[in-house]
Image (cartoon, helix red, strand yellow):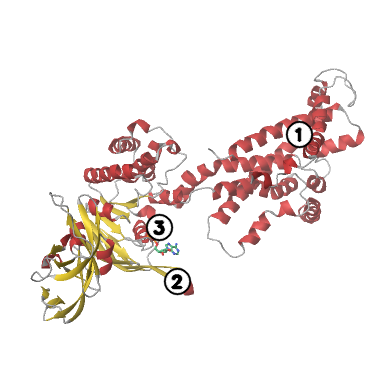
Amino acid sequence: MSSDDALIEIVDVTKAFGAGERRFLALGGVNATIRKGEFFTLLGPSGCGKTTLLRLIAGFELPSSGEIRLDGQEIGHLPPFRRPVNTVFQNYALFPHMTVAQNIAFGLEMLGKPKAEIAATVERMLTLVKMTELAGRRTDQLSGGQQQRVALARALAPQPKLLLLDEPLSALDLKLRKEMQVELKRIQHETGITFIFVTHDQEEALTMSDRIAVMSRGQILQIGTPREIYAHPTNRFVADFIGETNFLRAAVKGGRAVLGPGVELPLAAGTADGEVTLAIRPEHIRLVPEGAAGALSATVGDATYFGTDSHVHLTLADGTGIVARQQTDPEGTQGPQAGAVLGVTFPPSAVQVLED
Amino acid sequence: MASRTFVAARLPGFSTIAIAVFIALYLPIAMLMIYSFNAGDSIAIWDGFSFQWYERAWENDKVKEVTIRSLIIAASAASISTVAATMAALATTRKKPFRGQTGIYVAINQPLMVPEIVTAVALLIFFASVKVATGYQGLGYLILAHSAFCVPFAYLPIRARLEGMNLTLETAAADLYATPWRTFRYVTLPILAPGIVAGMMLAFVTSLDDVVITLFVKSAGQDTLPTYLLAQIRRQVTGEVNAISTVLLALTVILLTTFFLLTRKRS
Ligand SMILES: Nc1ncnc2c1ncn2[C@@H]1O[C@H](COP(=O)(O)OP(=O)(O)OP(=O)(O)O)[C@@H](O)[C@H]1O
Ligand SMILES: [Mg+2]
């Protein structure tokens, strides 16, 4: 799928480390298209291959097979210094023998830009990341947040087509991290440069990204907007990794999922008979009196009160445990009591059929 | 708990031994320095303060000649061994561990382990046959010999500096459009510089005070400052030797202090 606004196309890329017995497939056939100007996030647990994919795009590693295209040109075999792609490293990797300004100028100097242009760009970058006062400082005299800004300015100064950020915020404390999240979005907006951002923090991914690729074990499982990924996960891993989810097994008969006696949900056309796994978010589960029409009966285990809402743990007739999230009502009435038998229902639109 | 740990400083007699060792180490050096300012001719009887030995040494053409020769050899050997050591350090730290790496490590540091006299004899025999074959009699042999045994002294501080360097810095330079050569020139080398300077100074000092290998390798009339002093002392001990030694000591202390400051980790 090559469209006009595609910046990066990753086609069937694999990456294996080692050989023979020790051979390890870090990426097993990854496909993705990243659009111009996009804030694209790679999200996944530790060791799933996020850094490896980033290093392949930057040119620090070569793919074992497959193609990486930038603006339609194959770049997968080029050394890093020939790719119009810059990286913000997790440990910042600022040059300790240079000042802040010299660090920012480095890329432009290597590109052989005229002195006046370099000076002007450095000035602009310092303003962009709000570091003008510290231009002459040595980088080992900066705080973590300041180093972060310099690393960002240094990578943006050569005006790359693509900026890669490998967990740039993970070394910062929570407050600074929130601040930098906002800053990053602002800077991306002002420069218009495409960002590929790596994180294993789902909240960070959901709040910052235009689109997210969820990765697991060297594969991209799903690509979509934060809403799509959260509301319509296509497989169990994604549903489980992003937010909290209840899983229910159901029999499929004539295009309907049968959850219990008299409890049926319409499925998308063409779903074959057999068994499926359904995913339902806790906030979409409704608690109703026992025996209400279309309700599954469930026994209340315990409930945890969180202020704005409470989490009610329930056990269905078949033994499946589920969690329902209940908004606290204005009267402050007591929630369900342990041991009570209730009915649970869910709107058909809130139920996701998973692929697995 | 603390009282149970072994603390050597608490052993009976520890301070006595420590003081004795320090006296044995520094008293002779202190005496040597004091008597270099003696106005009298004796090296054992104090006769008042003067700079006469320094003046005599300064006016002694032979001293000038051997000093200049020593400095030429030390400077050349330090330069050659530092270049070799830098390359060796890069080759042994910037590559993935390879088979035979330990062997190479041992080979580089061989002069630290093999008795100096063995190296000296080996060099003597080797250079003797080269001399016969080429007819060349110059300082080249001494420079080469010194370069060889100075390599590990230059290598160790450079290697330590390289190992302490964050490898991501080189990756970052490549990411910012620096070719491998420019990465080396603008990132690796400047960061390595204190290690290289330190290694060079250590090599310089090592070459400057070498006696054994120089004695074996030198041709007639190629005395260096240490071999000259040795020859002098055999004949008669004058305050001139004290004066020269004191200057040499001062030079070494300055270089080693600089070395220490350069290799000390920045806090
Ligand atoms: N140079 C290498 N040699 C061998 N295996 C490697 C190498 N680099 C990465 N791997 C392996 O590839 C897998 C993916 O690593 P990668 O660094 O891409 O994970 P990640 O998703 O970035 O994880 P994290 O969130 O912990 O940073 C890991 O199992 C890792 O051990
Ligand atoms: Mg990683």
Chain letter of mark 1 equals: B
Query: How far apart are the alpha carbons under marks 2 and 3?
Result: 19 Å
Q: Quick check: A285 left or right of A9?
A: left
Q: Residues within 10 Å of mark 1 (few under 14, many from 20)?
A: some
Closer to the camera: disc 2 or disc 1?
Answer: 2
Residue type at mark 1 is: Thr
Label 2 beta carbon within 8 A of ligand 1: no
**Residue at position x 78%, y 40% in the image:** B14
Residue tagged 2 = A23
In this rendering, position of residue A63 left or right of residue B62: left
**Percent of width and height locating residue B155:** 63, 49
Crowd band around label 3 with a 10 angstrom C-alpha radius: few (<14), some (14–19), many (20+)? some
The Cα–Cα distance between marks 3 and 1, rounded to whole angstroms, is: 52 Å
- Return the residue nearer the eye: B219 or B171: B171
Give the Cα distance between marks 2 and 1: 61 Å
Would residue A292 be found to the left or right of residue B137 on screen?
left
Does the Cβ of the disc 3 residue fall within 8 Å of ligand 1?
no
Q: Which of labels 2 and 3 is toward the front?
A: 2
Q: Which label is found at residue B67?
A: 1
Q: Are marks 2 and 1 in contact (CB under 8 Å)?
A: no
Chain letter behind tag 2: A
Answer with mark 2 or mark 3, whichever residue precedes in sequence.
Answer: 2
Q: Which residue, given by chain and number where applicable, does mark 3 sit on?
A: A60
Quadrant containing ligand 1: bottom left
Q: Look at the image and tell me in which quarter the N terminus of chain A lies.
A: bottom left
Q: What subunit carries mark 3?
A: A
* Residue at x 29%, y 58% (from the top left corner): A42
- In this rendered view, identify the residue nearer to me: A15 or B192: A15
Point out the residue furthest to the left here: A293
Amino acid type, mark 3: Phe
Q: Which amino acid type corresponds to the residue marked 2 in the rendered image?
A: Arg
